Image (tube, grey):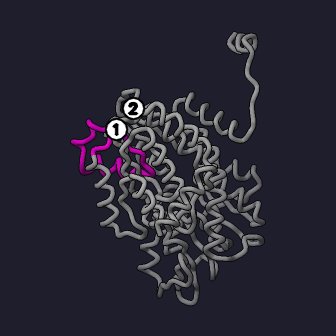
Amino acid sequence: MIESGRNKLDWVRPHMPILQEIENRFIRQQPFAGKTIAVCIHLEAKTGRLCEVLKSGGAEVFLAGSNPLSTQDDVAEALKERGIHVYARYNCSDEEYDAYIRSLITASPDIILDDGGDVVEMVHASYPHLADSIVGGCEETTTGVLRLRSRAARGELLLPMISVNDALCKCLFDNRYGTGQSVWTGIMQTTNLTVAGKTAVVAGYGWCGKGVAMRAKGLGAQVIVTEVDPVKALEAYMDGFQVMPMKQALPLGDIFITVTGCNEIITAEDAHLLKDGAILCNAGHFDVEVDVKGFKAQCDSVREVRKNIAEYRFGGKKVYLLAEGRLVNLASGDGHPAEIMDMSFALQALSAVYILNNRLAPEVYDVPDEINAEVAELKLSSLGASIDVLTDAQKDYLTQ
């Protein structure tokens, strides 16, 4: 198993050239010498590569997976071999998952790199006395940022946190192109069914929803978008998609993808409105967008008909749920492409250095513009592309 993990780590390395450039810099500068970094992100090869880069900068790295079904055990074993402290296993219990998160916190990290907010939430709930020793952290995903902003609005946030999720080099590429591709890769390899000719219902038209809808259209699906935000709904309409409430879309859809960050988007009470054979999956962070508990409580029977596909029977109707309602692109696939995560994890690594060098008050911060621009420039360089540079005369003109 460990050889498989080594191979995965070696495969992503040349496909993540920005991290390679940052690693070369970190080896020289040692920005994290004597520091401990706790990482709670989906544990697969690309995250492993980020941890290797952090370690190259002098950090002691403690790693847990942010979703039990996205952890790849072979990668976890290979990372242990390379000096990363790993607390995770595939399909762990809720109790084990909590214990793994606690292991990160009790390692007394200086910096937290979170995905979904579970580490930061546990710090606040169970270890507030440790907050003063934590310099700060970064949050990778929309759900985690929502939790942080909610806590900050209540005046309860104890740590300075950088919203990597909202950086342009993250939301424009990771959320749109990464999610758009990886969600459909997960669906297709799990179901082994065609997309062309089917009706796909995408719940939520944020950056992730835009990517999912765009790729569905490219695969030949008819696309319906459901939204609660009138501006986003109008944008979806102008992009060429049908827009309607979920209750109207339920009888029409063949494949449903929830990408909202909210809960109870499709409930057990909705099952009678679905087509026989409808496929449901989630691309939001937590397994609450499809009401899995309600489905289990109200269905006549449930069985696994194929790996990561549960068949729920409601009377004579069958409804299929992928990956237990967890992130379909990671629980049923390998997640975003390496080239996409190269950008997102570069933002994480450089933002971690920024947090260490700038003692910030407890608040949610944007990624500094200079980091965003640097990542974009490194990406362009890796692609062999270049851009124009303003002359002094042009700069003067623009500032008059």
Q: Vertically, is 104 above or below 375?
A: below
Image position of 199 (left or right of 301): right
| Near-viewer residue (312 or 1) | 1
- Report the quarter where the C terminus lies: top right
Label 1 belongs to which residue? 35
**Residue in the picture at 63% in, 50% down:** 15
Question: Residue 356: which numbered mark, if any?
Answer: 2
Residue type of the residue flagged with mark 1: Lys
- Counting from the top left corner in percent of width and height, residue 289 is at 50, 63
Answer few, some or many: residues within 10 Å of disc 2's Cα (few below 14, many 20 plus, some between 14 and 19). Answer: some
The single residue placed furthest to the bottom in the displayed view is: 316
Question: Between residues 300 and 353, which one lies in front from this camera angle?
Answer: 353
Q: Magenta segment, which residues? A: 108-134
Specify the quadrant of the image occupied by residue 129: top left
Q: Position of residue 256 (x, y in %)?
A: 62, 68
Relative height, residue 25 to residue 326 (above, below): above
Q: Is disc 1 placed on a helix, strand or loop?
A: loop
In front of the other: 197 or 45:
45
The secondary element bearing badge 2 is classed as helix
Kind of residue indicated by mark 2: Leu
Image point 72% across, 11% down: which residue? 392
